[in-house]
Amino acid sequence: MKIQESAENYLEAILILMQKNGQVRSIDVAHYTGFSKPSISRAVGLLRDNGYVSIDQNGLLGLTEAGLKIAETIYERHTVLTDLLTKLGVSPETAAEDACRIEHVISAETFDKLKEHVRKYGALAGE
């Protein structure tokens, strides 16, 4: 299912924070993303309504199976693309920023071929 880029970013942020801290609240996502608490609360509510996020009685966020699948896909794209761009000589900061934009629009086919190339040759053919 195709969802908006902003929703993918929120799901990715929740995944990263869960891996880092174990528990995630909306305020953690707000601090991580730099968006306001009301903006995050609205986004989390929409993600919950669409079946991507769960919220327990203590306000802790969790990812549903569908939300986890999207978050893991986006996070993998981000890390692989950032690594590839860095190996190509792009500064780490620019590589991360560019990867964040690319990760949402790259096709599964192209991404799979990039991963295959990196596994086979490293960042560049002939490395």
Image: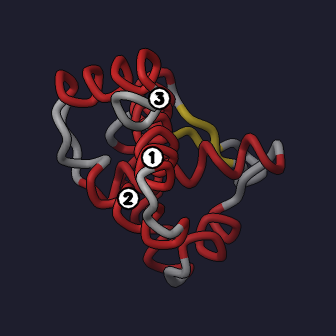
Q: 41 and 1: which one is in front?
A: 1
Q: Residues within 10 Å of mark 1 (few under 14, many from 20)?
A: many
Residue at numbered disc 1: 78
Q: Position of residue 104 (x, y in %)?
A: 26, 48
Identity of the amino acid at label 2?
Cys
Give the number of the disc on residue 100.
Answer: 2
Q: Position of residue 89 (x, y in %)?
A: 45, 60
Q: 121 and 71: which one is in front?
A: 121
- Judged by depth in the image, the label closer to the viewer, 2 or 3, is 3
Label 3–label 1 contact, CB within 8 A: no
Query: Counting residues from the N terminus, which is met first, the one under dot 1 or under dot 2?
Result: 1
Residue 102 position (above or below residue 35): above
Query: Counting residues from the N terminus, which is met first, the one under dot 2 or under dot 3?
Result: 2
Give the number of the disc on residue 122.
Answer: 3
Q: Residues within 10 Å of mark 2 (few under 14, many from 20)?
A: many
Identity of the amino acid at label 1?
His
